[in-house]
């Protein structure tokens, strides 16, 4: 019979299944009995025996874990943990809990919902024996890595404080607890929840996490256990996440005991990829201005400079980037830290990055330019590395020419002859000229004041700048709409005229007298008018004025005389009392113009009529009077009349400005 053996096999399989089912049924029944035996009034020995048998059953029949819910076994165990005081029983009860919840989310949630987390967390205290604490720690480890919901329950039960307490253990004796704490904290930051990570940072910092975490970083680095490498990386990442917190967290990291110092002490023992992460951490801390002094006390500048000295591939760019960012935050606007950085040897590194077209140039150049303002010691180091020439080379860079010129100014103010000798080199004069000629918009406005002061401090530089293209650019920009620009340009012009031996020839060639004279009368800014008058009063353009006067006299002799009647008995006092005469003159012109123009505004009190009256179709004005009017008024001093107007002269007479 070909089916005979098959039937026998079916019978054999049925027998094995029945035996297994019977065995499983007996195990379930036995488990139920043992759970019911966990009563507070039982002796310690009987409770230990019951717990041991439960552990054996769960180890042999893993599927029995699901029956704890069916047999309502979770509640009796929680009740026993709350009531029992026998250490031997407590450790075994916790072991049972860890067995049944392993990789079982349903049981974990059930246990947490009935209040198991705070009960079991209580056994992490140091007042319990180590074997009990280990079992409680294993429980915490499991619930921190199974479900986000369960982890949220753990945090809501003030579980973060327990993790901090684990970190305070002696690493050499209880490193398992330390590792569990590190894993738990790392899991908290990996949690995807609506709660911002910064809130976790503040809670953990408030509970004192950072100090023991920095200490444990040192211990874990020195641990020869192959598994310790994972925890080194996780501690570094935790510190990095803390450094990304708000101002409070950063201040805690910088000011609490020796956190930053321990981080610096650990840098040389870390692999380069983790060094980059730790340098990011320091950079993030330095972004808060309240942490900079603490970083300075922790010798951050010296440590970072040493890292630049010793760095190597393959993380050179990343390490340099983080170090330069941090140095920028530390040294910006602080002279003591700038000088400390210079003495630590940062200048050659900054010079290298500034001279190469790399993104790090934007951090190196501002520090270098600021160092010129620091002090003599710092400038001596800058001179040693030829940074002054670097400043001059930067004058043609539109982004840094203002900073570079201000650095040169700060230097030349203290060491005029030393810096002047470098500025007077032909190539450097050419760089200054190019900066003045090619500067655009805001850069042009901002280089004028330092350039003016440099020309005042160094007459040789002022004389060297007196070149045709310099004057052409200066005169062209005198029409700038901003008064401060025009004022600084006039100041530069005065500085050059003060020292140039051929200023009369320059004035005649470029028409400086006419331009300055017009600005002294017509510029709307009072300071500019006064400065223009001051320049004219210095006699810089005496030759030009003489020639101009002779030309005026020839022109006047060819014109028809001006016919005018007396307008006021006191008009002869114009030069003695210009304010009153200006008003009278203004009334005369207004009466002639009538409705053709609006009333003239009163001119400045220092005004002296100096131009001919023009007889074109445009209205007469105060500014159209020529120097011949003074002689004309002298002739009228002896006669007086009232309320008469000036008659219009022939149209062939033109105004001369």
Image (tube, rainbow, N blue to C red):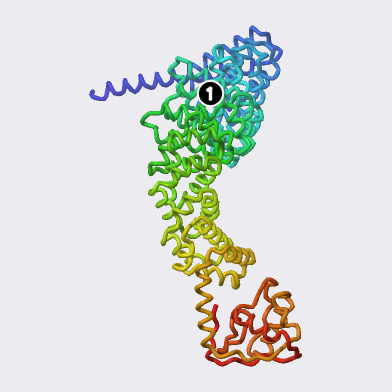
- Quarter of the image where the N terminus is located: top left
55 sits to left or right of 388: right
Q: How many numbered marks are there?
A: 1
- Identify which residue, 249 or 183, lies in the foreground: 249
Dot 1 crowding, Cα within 10 Å, few <14, some 14–19, many 20+? many
Q: Residue furthest top?
A: 45
Q: Is residue 505 left or right of residue 33?
A: left
What kind of element bears circle 1? Answer: helix
The percent position of residue 581, horizontal first and vertical second, equals: 72, 79
Instruction: Please determine whether, in this image, residue 335 is positioned above or below residue 97.
Output: below
Q: Nearer the viewer, residue 36 or 288?
A: 288
Q: Is residue 183 visible?
A: yes
Q: Residue at x 51, y 87 (%)?
A: 558
**The C terminus sits in image quarter:** bottom right
Q: Position of residue 130 (x, y in %)?
A: 60, 12
Could you tell me if residue 34 is visible in this image?
no
The residue under the point 59% across, 80% down is 626
The structure residue drawn at horizontal position 66% and vertical position 8%, both measured from the top left corner, is: 44
- Residue 52: give x, y in percent of width and height: 57, 11
Residue for badge 1: 65
Looking at the image, residue 230 lies above or below residue 128 = below
Q: Position of residue 639 (x, y in %)?
A: 73, 88
Q: Is residue 450 above or below residue 641?
A: above
């Amino acid at each position: 019979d070909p089916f005979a053996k098959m039937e026998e096999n079916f019978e054999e399989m049925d027998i094995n299944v029945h035996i297994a089912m019977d065995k499983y049924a007996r195990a379930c029944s036995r488990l139920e009995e043992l759970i019911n035996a966990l009563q507070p009034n039982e002796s310690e020995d009987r409770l230990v025996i019951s717990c041991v048998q439960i552990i054996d059953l769960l180890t042999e029949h893993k599927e029995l874990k699901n029956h704890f819910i069916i047999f309502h076994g979770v509640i009796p165990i929680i009740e026993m943990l709350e009531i029992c005081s026998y250490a031997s029983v407590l450790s075994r009860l916790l072991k049972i809990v860890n067995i049944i919840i392993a990789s079982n989310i349903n049981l974990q949630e059930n246990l947490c919902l009935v209040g198991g987390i705070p009960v079991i967390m209580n056994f992490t205290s140091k007042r319990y024996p180590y074997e009990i604490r280990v079992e409680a720690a294993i429980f915490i480890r499991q619930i921190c890595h199974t479900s986000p919901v369960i982890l949220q329950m753990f945090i809501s039960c003030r579980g973060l404080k327990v993790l901090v307490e684990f970190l305070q253990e002696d690493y050499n004796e209880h490193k398992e607890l330390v590792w569990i704490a590190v894993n738990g904290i790392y899991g908290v930051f990996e949690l995807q929840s609506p709660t911002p990570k910064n809130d976790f940072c503040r809670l953990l910092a408030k509970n004192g996490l950072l100090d023991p975490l920095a200490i444990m970083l040192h211990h874990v680095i020195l641990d020869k256990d192959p598994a310790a490498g994972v925890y080194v990386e996780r501690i570094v990442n935790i510190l990095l996440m803390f450094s990304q917190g708000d101002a409070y967290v950063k201040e805690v990291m910088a000011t609490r005991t020796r956190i930053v110092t321990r981080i610096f002490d650990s840098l040389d023992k870390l692999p380069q990829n983790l060094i980059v992460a730790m340098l990011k951490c320091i950079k993030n801390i330095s972004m808060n201005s309240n942490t900079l002094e603490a970083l300075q006390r922790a010798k951050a500048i010296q440590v970072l400079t040493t890292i630049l000295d010793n760095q190597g591939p393959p993380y050179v760019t990343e390490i340099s980037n983080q170090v330069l960012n941090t140095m920028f935050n530390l040294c910006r606007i602080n002279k003591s830290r700038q000088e400390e950085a210079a003495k630590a040897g940062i200048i050659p590194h900054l010079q290298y990055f500034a001279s190469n077209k790399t993104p790090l140039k934007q951090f190196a150049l501002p520090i270098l330019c600021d160092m010129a303002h620091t002090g003599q010691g710092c400038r001596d180091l800058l001179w040693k590395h030829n940074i002054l020439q670097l400043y001059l080379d930067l004058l043609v860079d539109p982004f840094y020419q203002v900073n570079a010129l201000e650095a040169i100014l700060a230097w030349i103010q203290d060491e005029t002859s030393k810096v002047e000798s470098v500025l007077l080199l032909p190539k450097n004069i050419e760089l200054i000229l190019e900066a003045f000629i090619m500067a655009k918009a805001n850069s042009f406005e901002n280089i004028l004041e330092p350039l003016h002061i440099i020309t005042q401090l160094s007459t040789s530089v002022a004389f060297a700048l007196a070149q045709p293209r310099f004057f052409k650019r200066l005169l062209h920009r005198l029409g700038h709409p901003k008064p401060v620009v025009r004022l600084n340009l006039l100041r530069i012009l005065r500085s050059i005229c003060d020292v140039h031996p051929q200023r009369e020839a320059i004035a005649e060639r470029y028409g400086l007298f006419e331009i300055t004279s017009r600005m002294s009368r017509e510029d709307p800014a009072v300071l500019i008018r006064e400065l223009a008058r001051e320049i004219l009063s210095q006699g810089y353009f005496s030759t030009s004025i003489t020639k101009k006067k002779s030309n005026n006299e020839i022109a006047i002799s060819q014109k028809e005389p001006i016919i005018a009647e007396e307008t006021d008995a006191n008009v002869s006092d114009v030069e003695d009392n210009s304010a009153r005469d200006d008003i009278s003159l203004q009334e005369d012109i207004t009466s002639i113009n009538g409705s053709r123009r609006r009333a003239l505004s009163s001119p400045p009190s220092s005004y002296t009529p100096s131009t001919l009256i023009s007889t074109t179709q445009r209205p007469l004005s105060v500014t159209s009077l020529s120097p011949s009017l003074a002689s004309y008024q002298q002739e009228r001093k002896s006669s007086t009349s009232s309320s008469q107007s000036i008659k219009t002269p022939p149209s062939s007479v033109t105004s001369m400005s």
